[in-house]
Image: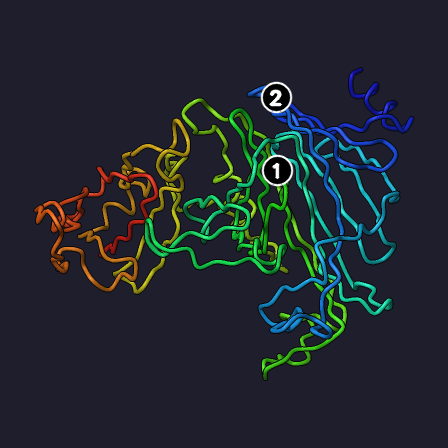
Amino acid sequence: QQQQQQRRSNELGATLTLENDNIKGTFDGTTGALLTITNKISKTTVKVTQTLSWYNASDGSNGPPGATGSGNYIFQPWSNKTTPFNTAPQVKYVEGQVMSEIRLILVQGSVEQVYRLGVHDKAIEILYRIGPIDISNGQGHEVIARFDTDVSSGSTWTSDVNGGEYRTRTRNQRATLWPGGPSYFTCTEPVACNYFAVNSIAYVEDATKRLTVLVDRSVGGTSLASGQLELMLHRRLTHGCRWGMCENGEVVGLNDTLGAEIVARHLITVDAVNSDGTSNSLSRQYARVLNYPPTLLFSLKNPENKSNFTPLAESLPDNVELTNFHLVSDTTAVLRLTHIFPAMEHPTYSKPVVVNLASVLGKTMSSRITNVSETFASADINLSQLERLKWTVNDNSAQHTKSLAKERNFVSAGDISNITMSPGDIRTFVLNF
């Protein structure tokens, strides 16, 4: 009955809703614009609007001294103003038993986006299809998705570094080369100077709530106002590549001049922020789902002997992933484990955890292992051979010269039933059979 009432409400053009037991999103029934996202578990709501717009890309002409225009590795818009694609898009609500969608067509044939939520999802997905971008007006387009929220984040926002630890970014500032060192940064491009790489996760937060956007590829991002996140999606320029860096006409390279089409995905979550600054956000796990989806394999023939197979006999802890399992030869394999939560990030998962790798691999495989040794990440040097340089420090304290092997649970005798993974750890093991 509730679903029928919701369906009738959506058909009448009132506020649209995507909702399950975990999360709820509300949308304007006429424009399809996002209005709010609520985490139903933590009872946290964030007001948020999301828009697709574009910067007019500079071509380097009539610019200030040193201006080159947008191009290879360069983002240089004419101004800090953006132009929305369409404020009155075509909107269609589609409800399914497994997943429901709100589909928006902003520019027929070239700019579309879909809000999507499955029955078990804990994040709202946004699917973008952009291109070929129309530049018949003579202006290069650098397309962004912008999220404006009621989060009081001030001049700061946060992004990940290569999918690892978070870094807090401050508008119009750069960190000094060393604590207390001189400031060398002068911002002459109010938009571009505030762009940073977002490899996996970006968020804004205040004392009580956080809005996180997860990306499916490395993009540029920024926050140009309190509570705002901005992420680059695509570009099409009026001029080609320069400085001898052309790549086959740059059809889909650093400078798209011929009009490529891209499909991108974002996941949006809302979480409460605890009094100690941690959050119950599971964005680290969502990022794995977004960036490492299952690989589907198909066969033209129906195999006669069907069987089920899993490489793991039991699950790993929720905060540990099997990053790599590589057979080097018939007698050697390389295995890497990653603790996906850094320290002081999550009240439960940002803690050391013990992994019984023998149980995870199962009796059959574990019984074949004759030796296990921990190595560097490159798997070519055993940690037992580690020799660190002994640096002279101000207090000459011996604690600065401890070897890595003594600082942690070191596996060298083939015992893999008690491997301690500390927050942020990436540990590499060579297994001999």
Residue tagged by mark 2? 40
Q: Is residue 131 visible?
A: yes
Q: Is residue 123 above or below residue 42?
A: below
Determine the secondary structure under disc 1. loop
Please provide percent x and percent y for residue 382. 18, 59
Q: Quadrant of residue 93?
A: top right
Please provide percent x and percent y for residue 299. 60, 58
Residue tagged by mark 1? 226
10 Å neighbourhood of mark 1: few (<14), some, or many (≥20)?
A: many
Task: Residue lying at the far bottom in this picture: please name it.
Answer: 244
Q: Which residue is painted at 36% across and 42% down in the image?
A: 339
Observer-side mark, 1 or 2, equals 1
Q: Is residue 75 above or below residue 249?
A: above
Q: Nearer the viewer, residue 184 or 325?
A: 184
Disc with the residue nearer the chain's start (1 vs 2): 2
Q: Is residue 433 visible?
A: no
Q: Nearer the viewer, residue 417 or 366?
A: 417
Q: Amino acid at mark 2?
A: Lys
Please provide percent x and percent y for residue 296. 58, 53
Left or right for 137, reference 142: right
Left or right for 351, reference 389: right
Please provide percent x and percent y for residue 334. 30, 57
